């Protein structure tokens, strides 16, 4: 980078120094792009329904609040019902 600025000053003065940095960045990117390997194959993206993580334990799905209250009431009423003998 310093050598590019120095060369820019020698070739075109202050204007050359100011243009040397962007020119070096463009050349650097072009060389890296041309010498890089082919692009890797795209991976599948599970944005909506990601695959399960095998390291995490599985949990039962959460029940809605109304269903939990209904089940609690059913347990309480069935425990209170006395069947005549």
Image: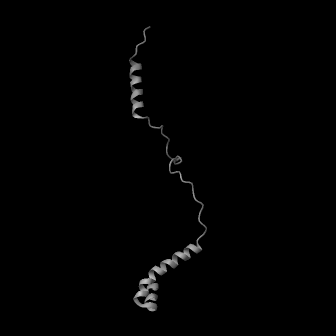
Please name the residue shown 45% across and 79% down the image: 22
Q: Quadrant of residue 33?
A: bottom right
Please say if 73 is above or below 3: above
For the residue pair 2 and 31, the one nearer the viewer reads as 31
Please tell me whether residue 37 is drawn above or below residue 79 in the rendered image: below
* Quadrant (top left, top right, bottom left, bottom right) of the N terminus: bottom left
Q: Measuring 40% from the left and 16% from the top, which residue is drawn there?
A: 81
**Display coloring:** one colour
Q: Quadrant of residue 79?
A: top left
The image shows residue 53 at horizontal and vertical percentages of 52, 47
Q: Residue at x 45, y 87 (%)?
A: 8
Give the residue displayed 50% in from the left and 77% down from the top.
26
Residue 75: x percent and y percent?
41, 23
Question: Image height check: is 7 above or below 69?
Answer: below
Give the x, y percent position of residue 70.
40, 27
* Visible residue check, residue 1: no
Q: Residue furthest top?
A: 85
Residue 46: give x, y in percent of width and height.
53, 51
Residue 53 vs residue 27, the one in the foreground: 27
What count of labels does the image hold?
0
Q: Is residue 83 visible?
A: yes
Quadrant (top left, top right, bottom left, bottom right) of the C terminus: top left
Depth check, front residue: 2 or 23? 23
């Amino acid at each position: 980078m310093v050598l590019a600025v120095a060369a820019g000053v020698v070739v075109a003065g202050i204007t050359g120094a100011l243009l040397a940095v962007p020119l070096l960045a463009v050349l650097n990117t072009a060389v890296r792009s041309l010498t890089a390997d082919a692009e890797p194959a795209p991976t599948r993206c599970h944005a909506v329904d990601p695959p399960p993580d095998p390291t995490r334990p599985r949990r039962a799905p959460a029940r809605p609040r109304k269903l939990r209250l209904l089940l609690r009431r059913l347990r309480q009423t069935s425990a209170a019902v006395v069947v005549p003998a």
